[in-house]
Image (cartoon, rainbow, N blue to C red):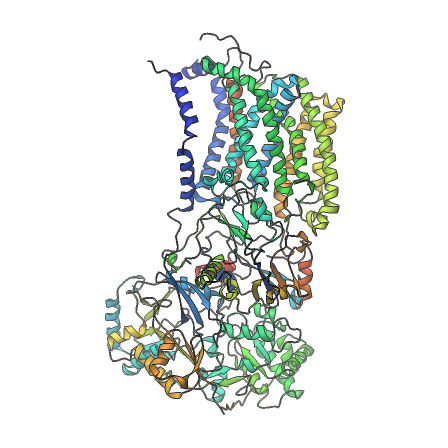
Amino acid sequence: MKFSRRDLLIGTAGVTAGIVFTPVPWKLLGDVSIWSQNWSWIPQPAHGPVETTLSPCTLCAAGCGMRVRMAAGFPVGISGVANHPLTKGALCTLGYAAHQLNWHPARLLRVRHSGRASSWPEAQAAFAAACAEGPIAVMDGRPGRAASVALETFAAKHNGSYQTVPGPETQALAPYAAWSGVPASTLGYDLENARTIVSFGAPLLDGWGTPGRFTRLWSARAAGQSDPQLRLIQIEPVLSHTAARAWRWLAVREGTQGALAAALARVLVEEHLVKAQGPLPEMTLEQAAVQAGLPIAEIRDLAHAMVEHGPTVVITSDGDPAVAALNVLLGAVGTPGGIILKSKVIPRHGAASTAPAKFRATVIDASVPWDLIPPAQGEVFRFATWDGGDSKADWLLPSPGFLEELTDIPTAPTSATETYAIATDLLAQPQETQTAAQFLRKIDASLPDVDKSIHARCEQIFQARLGTIYAGQSKPVAQFESAAKLEEQLRKGGVWLSEPPRNATLHCALKIWPAAAATAPAAPTDWTSTWAPPVLPPLAAKLYQESTVREAPARRLA
Amino acid sequence: MSETALIDRRWIARDAERASTARFLLWLFPWVCLLLLGIYAAGLCFYYGLNQTNMDNRFAFGMWIFLDLSIIAMGAGAFFTGFLVYILKQTDLKPVLNTAVVVGLTCYSGAVAVLMVDVGQPLRAWFTFWYPNTHSMLTEVTFCISCYLLVLILEYIPVLVQNRQLRRVPSFLVFEHQAHKLVPVLAGVGAFLSFFHQGSLGGLYGVLRGRPFAYRQGFAIWPSTFFLFILSAIAVGPSFLMLVVAAAEKITGQTLVDFRVYRKLGFISGVLLAIYVAAKAIDTYVWLNVTSPRLGFGPWDYYSYWPFSSTFLFAATVPLGLLPAILFIVPRTARHRGLLLLAAALTCCGVLLNRFVMTVQTLALPTLPFDPFLKYIPSWQEVATFGGVLAYGVIVYSLSYRYLPMFEATKGEAKNVSLD
Amino acid sequence: MSARYGMVIDLDRCTGCGACMIACASENNVPPAAPRATWRTGITPMLVHTLSNGKEGVDRREAFIPIACMQCEHETPCVSVCPQQAVELDKSTGIVMQMPQRCLGCRYCMTACPYHARYFNWWDPQWPPGMEHSLNPGVSVRMRGVVEKCNMCHARYHDALQKAAAAGKKKIDLADYVPACVEACPTGAIAFGNLADPNDPVTMAAKSPDAFRLLESIGTEPKIHYKTTQAWIRALADRNSGRPTEAQHV
């Protein structure tokens, strides 16, 4: 039988019509759409039970309590701890994406020497040689940790200088430290007892200090109230997020806060709004008002507002002594509601030794802010978890990342009470990383290791019998049977809170009203300024790139 | 003649006057380039995703949806002419019937092609058939357009098999004869389907209670835009058909239809347009004074943003609505070919404007009290895809005109089969 | 409906910090921004807008308003328009559920939503290498070409259901179901509760004279309420879209 073209056509038509009645096309259609739901390049979350564990955050000195959800051995979510005594369940804005930071593209996992790949043995050898040749500087950005003991001991034993880099919030307390003769790290703000807070540019509602502490306090005592129990007066040139919610916002020109403070001081004294305690600024009220660019009536108004609902405390963002002196006038140094002295159960190291003029090498711990360039550095061994870019360091040494390091959290800078917490390594420390303390121990094995230092501190807390441990519930230290049990609670993510020192007095010796600080701030500040790591979590782009609630950050790597 | 030209000539009807192969290829060349560019743009969208367009979360519908609504309105000439010829027995419109079918086919298939690029997951396009939502206008649109496309293909095949070479296949001839009987049924079905989906396209916007600019009350489940869209579609269908035929005449240099056909199409268009303008005026009044204020929005919310002033509303109603209706209906103006075609062009512009206003302006206007007025400019990929569809239409029509009896009044009558 | 989960967001407390946005993105496996993404093409199931009174200088007032899916109850605009029923108002929770696996990506629901609470995946989601390990197991990862939106952290509701079931109970304990944004807000501005329960503090807050909803006149019955004591915010919200010179978003 001849198979003609017509037969072919009819055959094709028949097959096409018939195939519709078979499952074939329908199954294929279904498969095709299932394929569109399971493309291989779309990542899938891990399978596995989800466990929750507590840990303090290690990204900045605040050490906020976090609840970390872990699945298949990785952190998959961060939230606050609802009844945490310090944070009241809140974290900073970007902290909720902290668990993604270990995979940030700028993560350092390879030793780099002058821009090219190197190795730990080479770095070790170079450092050992440097040690032999001249004095070493060791810089610590978060003094008071267990690791700090190792750093400081190394500097003391090996012809070195231990230098601390206090964070901006500790620096803001420096004037009071200078005037009262106590270390800034032992001072804190008694916000809970203040009724008026005058902030000169400090982003109190936007990441300042331990973020949750003040936001919760303000929410309970001020938000939505026409006559709030806690009055927040925000003084800054722009309408920041804090200023937008403050009870009063005073718009001042950039660089004039010192003049405004001088004017306020004049009014406070001349109108007998405070008991005159100490020196007055040289400028007259009129001169100061002109410099500040504000009408005198407005300044008088502000001065009255500052004192009519006391206790009042002034908080600066940069520790400008010319503004901090207002606290002396207001009697807010060493009194409830103002700058107070914290208890000191855990002895602090951190006394910087005298520095030689030049160093053969400088070791910069990962806790030092990325943009800080130390003077007289020699060969720089820079430890860091993320590469913040434009580093002039000779050696870039990868440090453990988020939750990858056993470390402890000394008292948060602005806290009113002494605290202590331990962050364990929930994730194994990657082989390619070392902390500065671990590195130095390779040179000198006698340096105290972090574990031992932590044991010692827990012992000190236990012996002092002061305060409570919060690990889901609060339990007084006195009720613990041993230091080991106490340490166990802390290693599970608990936190120790001391009590404020009784009968602690602070005498402020202020002879002359301080001169105003330099007009421009050292570095541009924006909403990322309170974020410590040099890189933002990738999700941060949601806040400025995919929305307009924040402006694009000035200096950080996204 | 060259070998190619000889082969080419064999596919053209013996008594048909057509341009030389070379000239025809020259004519096709730019359109083919445009089509290829469109395919490339669509390919980019398939490969990289819809970020290749300038649509965004606020302008979730952009140029392509405007294009779809517009060309489906233009393609309404297909069903409406079929309805007029086969159901209402207006046989003097027969000469343009094939053109109407081809125009409809290219408009609808082009629209479906663009829709496939427009959706984020084209592989799931069949979900609408499998999990249909009877409350959604878009379900109705999908079903009816798919079915109607099938109808159009079925209406086109009989035209296709009238090609000189194809009708030499006896089974095709037989098929064509049988299909000829089916055509009135197809026309009826097509009219029914089209009625609904033209309306549903209007209903797409009329049901959006979240967009007071578009929301209309209506009859039962159908907002007034349902009926207005049907009216405007059947008003513009004949106009667009007139323009296509006129363009064909201009390009080929031949007179393809009698002027009376133009006048008839124009008259039908004009009457429908007049009814449409009246209906729209009533609808606009009700909308601005009752429906919209009830939702908390008023004219100041719609017409305070440049360039969307009330000029648009005026333009759509008077110079692009009432004026062409008058030009079509009044004999003195309808006698002039130029004015007739002008009226047709104005009608098309009016419907385009109406579709634009419903799709683009609806999305540009803010709904939330703190939102700004938004702008949208299509990306080159979107424009190229649109160009590709246009090119596709021109190419299909050119090929159809060249190789098929588009303007034979005796549609379906078998000519003597000659031995070649 | 057995439960009607809703919120009351206190605009006097919202500082516009964005913690809710970050926590939401983290919980729901929302990818980091594509390089070309903007506020109009990003995926922000929770999105904070800035409001202002339109004045400049010392008279300027600003506030912040978080916008997420309003979980509309009456003739939910997006439910009725989806051609393949990929959106459904869940009667047991009052949550408007979106099924990305069935979504065709036609975006009709996005044109229907007057709150602009729906977001399209214009790009394939991409994380830096290794960051997939940080994805939340409870939430599926979407692909390009589908629409997504806030679903009130339904994975957390599911976990609460499982916890209740394990304890032999049929109803969840509301303390076990806290959406990510509610949990993250540092001032506690977002209150979450069951509006079907007359004793729920959120229900009572929603009835206070300071409370309002956006676009109430449209009649979609959103379940996200706002409250403020500030008259200028109230005036802004009560007005419809407004004249072009008034408060701008950008």
At a point 63% along the width and 31% down the height, the residue shown is: B195
| Side of B170 where A118 appears, left or right | left
Q: Position of residue A439 (x, y in %)?
A: 28, 72
Task: Work out which quarter of the rendered image holds the C terminus of chain A and state it.
Answer: bottom left
| Side of A504 where B73 appears, left or right | right
Relative to A480, does residue C137 appear above or below in the rendering? above
Q: Position of residue A36 (x, y in %)?
A: 42, 44
Q: Tell which of B162 and A152 is nearer to you.
A: B162
Residue C18 in view: no
The quarter of the displayed image where residue A457 is located: bottom left
How many numbered marks, from 0 up? 0
At a point 72% along the width and 26% down the height, the residue shown is: B328
Spot the residue most to the front: C168
Q: Position of residue A473 (x, y in %)?
A: 45, 77
Q: Tell which of B57 and A354 is nearer to you.
A: B57
At a point 73% along the width and 31% down the height, the residue shown is: B274
Residue A103 in view: yes
Q: Position of residue A270 (x, y in %)?
A: 66, 87
Relative to A377, does residue B341 appear above or below in the rendering? above
Task: Work out which quarter of the rendered image holds the N terminus of chain A and state it.
Answer: top left
| Side of A88 where B234 appears, left or right | right
Q: Tell which of A434 and C236 is nearer to you.
A: C236
